[in-house]
Amino acid sequence: MPPIFDHQKDWIIDIGASDHMSHCRSLFLDLREPPMAWQVRLPTGETIAVEGVGSIPLSKTLTLSNVLFVPTFHYNLLSIPQITSHLSCVVTFSSSNVFFRTIN
């Protein structure tokens, strides 16, 4: 039976995450050193180091910028506050879908 969740490519949509984060180096188009020693605090209270910052394409028309590379986290987080600000959109959740609608 194949896994339901693929930790390499699937994203957790997180309304509480302040930044997009990924543990998977191969997803990044570009990756640069963080501008300073940077750490993130996980919901568990654990603090882990950010090893880079870069861009990740989600589709042909959408690329996430300023994604934190955190290889010890083991998940990919899509920050709702970041994406709504970046895209000037609103997010609607249904039982099985997430919809992003631009604000006109």
Image (spheres, helix red, strand yellow):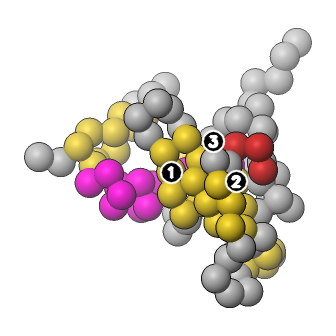
Which x, y percent locates residue 84? 35, 55
Mark 1: few, some, or many residues within 10 Å (few <14, many ≥20)? some
Q: Earlier in the sequence, mark 3 or mark 2?
A: 3
Residue with the mark numbered 1:
64
Measuring 50% from the left and 32% from the top, which residue is drawn there?
A: 59
Q: Which stretch is magenta?
A: 76-88
77 above or below 101? below
For this orientation, the residue located farthest to the left is: 104
Task: Please provide percent x and percent y for residue 58.
Answer: 54, 37
Q: In the visual, does 94 lie left or right of 50? A: left
Query: What percent of the width, then of the height, locates residue 1?
Result: 88, 12
Tag in front: 3 or 1: 1
Q: Is residue 58 left or right of residue 87?
A: right
Q: CA distance from mark 3 to mark 2?
A: 9 Å
Asked if 34 appears above or below 65 in the picture, the reply is below
Q: Is residue 39 magenta?
A: no
Amino acid carrying mark 3 in the image: Trp
User: Which is nearer the N-term, disc 3 or disc 1?
Assistant: 3
